[in-house]
Image (cartoon, rainbow, N blue to C red):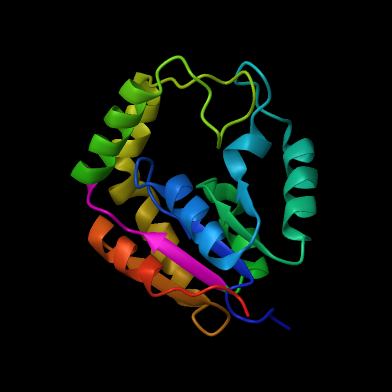
Amino acid sequence: MKAAPLQRILVIGPPGAGKSHFARQLGERLGLPVIHLDAHYWSAGWVEPTPAEWASRLAALLARPAWIMDGNYSRTLAQRLAACDTVVFLDLPRWQCMWGLLRRAWTERGRVRADMAAACPEKLDRAFLVFAWRYRSRSRPAVMRLLAQGRDQWVVHRLASRGQARAWLEGVSGRG
């Protein structure tokens, strides 16, 4: 049985959409803990976990009673969807996401973001830019299929602009 709505919330979307910032703001409004997947996936120096390590870490995170979880990690999206009650899909246009990535790379260059693992300073390389550029044509169709398959299992809020995201946040009230 699913938890009551707004107890386990996934914030998903393309790189540069503002998932971490949105998740932090939503966490403040609802009083729920925020889980930034990047902070749990990476180890110092941008070292990736083994598949078994990542599966174990993710299972422990998903077992928590309430959370807001942000991040892409498409290989685990079905597993995360099965554990959530609400999805916020920041489905912003490509140009806004690319601008968000470039702005973040410039303002955070050389620093470790609060939503990132320790000793993983901000970086922007060609491979990540290509992934971000291709998200809409390569990753988004699979995300849309998964979201449609579970429409009876979770509530989906598809927000197509930063303005829609702000308005949605303003309409969310804290837990009793």
Is residue 95 depicted above or below 9 in this figure?
A: above
Residue 47 screen position, x and y as percent: 65, 21
On the question of residue 96 being in view, the answer is yes
Q: Which residues are magenta?
A: 86-94
Instruction: Determine the image quadrant of residue 32.
Output: bottom right
Residue in view at x 76 percent, y 44 percent: 57
Pick the quarter of the image with the C terminus: bottom right
Instruction: Determine the image quadrant of residue 120.
Output: top right
Closer to us: 110 or 58: 110
Closer to us: 175 or 159: 175
Residue 73 screen position, x and y as percent: 55, 45
Left or right, residue 3 beside residue 111? right
On the question of residue 146 being in view, the answer is no
Q: How many marks?
A: 0
Closer to us: 157 or 166: 166
Residue in view at x 70 percent, y 65 percent: 66
